[in-house]
Structure formats: C-alpha cells, structure tokens
Image (tube, helix red, strand yellow):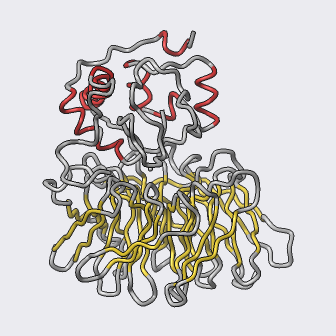
Amino acid sequence: MRCLVLALVVVAAISSTSHAQQSKYYELSKGDYPHDVAVGPNGEVWYAGQKLGIAGRLDPATGEIDRISLGKNSAPHGVIVGPDGAPWFTDGGQNAIVRVDPATKEVEVWPLPPERMPYTNLNTAAFDGRGRIWFTGQNGIYGRLDPKTGDMKVWDAPKGRGAYGITGTPKGDIWFVSLAGSYLANVDLETGAATIYEPPTKDQGARRVWSDSKGRLWISEWNSGNVSVYDPAAKTWKQWLLPGEKPRTYAVWVDPDDKVWLSDWAANAIVRFDPAIERFKSFPSDRPGANVRQILGRKGETWIAESGTDRVRVIRHAATN
Amino acid sequence: MYLASTVVPAVAAGDAARGERVFQRCFACHSVDPNEQAKLQGPSLYRIMGRPAAAVPGFEYSDAMRRKGAAGLVWDRATLDRYIADPEGLVPGTAMSAPPPRDEQERADLLAYLGRSIALSGGRRSLRACTCRSYTTPAVAEP
C-alpha cells in the first residue's frame, strides 16, 4: 500500500513574548495514529503509524504525505533517522527492525530471532558511534543489529520487562531506561553488558531518555512526573517536578541548544525546560487528548507526534528563546 | 446496565495454551499473577472476567476508563473482545496504546487464557508470562 494524501495544515502563533514561537498542526489520515516521529536530513518528517502498520512521510513544505506499508502484521512503535538518512523503525508487530529507503521506498526487514521470544514488544532504537542500531523490547530485552553484516544480538534486560527509551550520546555510547524497572542503564558496546544507575526517586517510571550535547542523560519520569538528569562525568543526579497538578511526563527530547522538550499528559501540553535558568514553559495542544508519546526535531524545529488526535505538530522557535 | 454490551457479537472459541503466547502482547504492561510485585502501567488482569471496569484498588485509571466503569461497563468475553480489538472504539480516551490483535482467533485464544486464570487461581498456582520465553521474569495500558 502506498498512497499520497495532503495534510490539512493549521498554523497558530503560540507566544506573545518577543521571541514568538509558531505552532503548526498537520492533520493526518484518521487512524494513522502517529506513535513516534523523526526528521530526515532534508527536513522531511517520518512517523510510525502503529495501528495501520505504515511509515508516514510528511513534506512540511507542501503538506503532502506518503504512506508506505511496512508489511503484514506491522505495528511500528518507534522511528529514528539513522546516519544513512533513512528512517529505521522498531516494529513490534513484525518483531523486527525495519528500514525504509527514502529514495526508492524499499522496505528492509531484520526479524529478531524468534526462538528467544516470538514477541518482544519492540520499543525504541538508537545508533551507536559505529553504525550499529541498538533497540529495546518492553517485554524485557535489548539488542544490537549491525546492518552491514546482519549480525543481531539480543540480551535479557535487567529486572525483566520494562525496557523502553534508548539514546546515543555524542561520543556514541548507548543508554536506555526501564519503565517498569525504574532505572537508567549504560551498555558495553562490545559485550552488551548493562550497568544500572538508579534515579533518586523510587519507582519513578523512567520512560524515555535523551542525551544533551555534553552526554548528560535526560529522563522523562512517568510515575513521578519529574524530569531528571544524570551526568556520567560527575556521577550526579538532579530532578525537577513538572508544573501543574499530578504531571505525567511521557516524552523527552533535547534540542541542539540543550533545551529539554517534554510532553505532559496531565496538562495535555508540550513543556520546554531550560536547564540554565531551571524554568519551564508550556505549549498546550489546541485539542484535548493529544497523547504525545514522542518528540524529536532539529535546530529550531521541535516535531511532536499527537497519537490521540492523528496529527503531527511542529513548534518552530528561535534558538535563544 | 451498560447498554453498549447489549449488542453482543459472537466470540469465537479460544485455546488457552495458544492464548498464553498471545498474552506476550500484553505482558509488558499487565500481569495475571495475583502476587505480582512490579509496578506496571496496566492493571492486573488476574480474575478480569466479570470484573467491573476501573475496579482494581489503587490503580490510577484514565478518566475515560473511570467514566466507563461508573457507567456500568463489566469485563466479559464480549466486552473484552471489543476492547482488545479497538480500545478507542469502546473507551474513547483510554490510555491503552497497544496495537490490537487483528486476528479474531488470536483474540479468542487470549480471552480463553485470561478466563483460565480464574480456574487455576486460588493460591494453588499463579500464572506468569508465556512459558515459551527463557527470560528471568519479568508498561500505558488498561482494562
């Protein structure tokens, strides 16, 4: 299945400050259910259409959307853009890592070894500094694929189920978090061994993680409503509670200017945290139930997957505001 | 009475052994072990059949699920089948995000497995994750 549709675009200025941000919403086809989102090298935006098993490709300039079937039983949870400029999907339905060639739309599939676990609930992926893609499976695994050779390794996650967000640092190290296990882990890139780092808040529900430019790990804590940060060099933790009543911190992404972008389900809002001044700024959705599960972007653009409204949102902002 | 459940589609007969494998789709967020200690994102499915929606003490349900529970939704084979097939369709605003099993037989097998947890419970045995996995044992979802 492949079809082209045009997204309905709604634009809104969302700040009255001197450094106004502009929010734009792209209406996808009903049921597309964009779980995760990622930006390609030419500004094209990919999303994981989890319920329909599609890769969505949005051209922000024209609003044109290309919907590419990823295969029978596909249900992609995550999408990232690799160093090759292509989108890579963690496809729970196919229990496989999936790549789409951005030029030819060819779909390549690397299934996980079924004898280990036929359904690992694949979650998220990140590339290390050596061109290998690391992934998590929420049923309690993490793994590594070398796309050049096809070599794939899968390991049991500490404490069993819950392995969720994963990120690569500027040095190429790999870290992941466990939602049910409430920990941050660093993997040995060769042996795969995982070393656990426990955030200070017990049972905090570490859901997603992202590295800033200095290799510090920013974590969205679902159960506690915190954003926390671990500095591997200083071996220190800090955490902040998001504003509002009973915040639920789901997604985290750190932009190239080291501002931390988060989604808060309780407030139905995107929240930006500036570590330099330790202040939050809220960007509520214009519709209820946005259910933002992932944020990713590039300099000056924060892309947001609204799984609950079948929309992709972008907040364009100056680097210093 | 919960009116939506008066239109009851037929649910195919299921196989609990196969359903144990299907339960892997639910395993990250749910448990059928009455002694489960992990803090999971979905409520326990132990003795789910016949239980009113949003009824597990201490679990933080979504507002949408709480409203359905207050309106009288009870989990049985028919309502669970509808929910698993289309969570948003039955409970708009639900926090459950798992992609639904599209195969009717898979859902029937899963329901058979969930139903079996009643018969095998009572302190004599607790059902854990799929026995086909080799992991040590053991996150948004609900019924």
- Quadrant in which residue A140 is drawn: bottom left
- Residue at the image position 86 percent from the left and 73 percent from the top: A17
Q: Nearer the viewer, residue A206 or A10?
A: A206
From this view, report whether residue A143 is shown above or below residue A73.
below
On-image quarter of the C terminus of chain A: bottom right
Give how far across and how far down residue A91 sits, in percent. Answer: 32, 56
- Residue at the image position 40 percent from the left and 56 percent from the top: A162
From this view, report whether residue A160 is shown above or below residue A128.
above
Q: Left of A18 or right of it: where is A229?
A: left
Q: Left of B32 or right of it: where is A200?
A: right
Give how far across and how far down residue A209 sits, in percent. Answer: 50, 70
Give how far across and how far down residue B139 sits, in percent. Answer: 44, 50
Q: Nearer the viewer, residue A265 or A56?
A: A265
Q: Residue furthest front?
A: B123
- Quadrant in which residue A112 is drawn: bottom left
Give how far across and how far down residue A312 sits, in percent. Answer: 57, 58
Q: Nearer the viewer, residue B3 or B131?
A: B131
Q: Left of A260 or right of it: where is B39?
A: left
From this view, report whether residue A267 is shown above or below residue B72.
below
Q: Left of A176 or right of it: where is A119?
A: left
Whether residue A252 is visible: yes
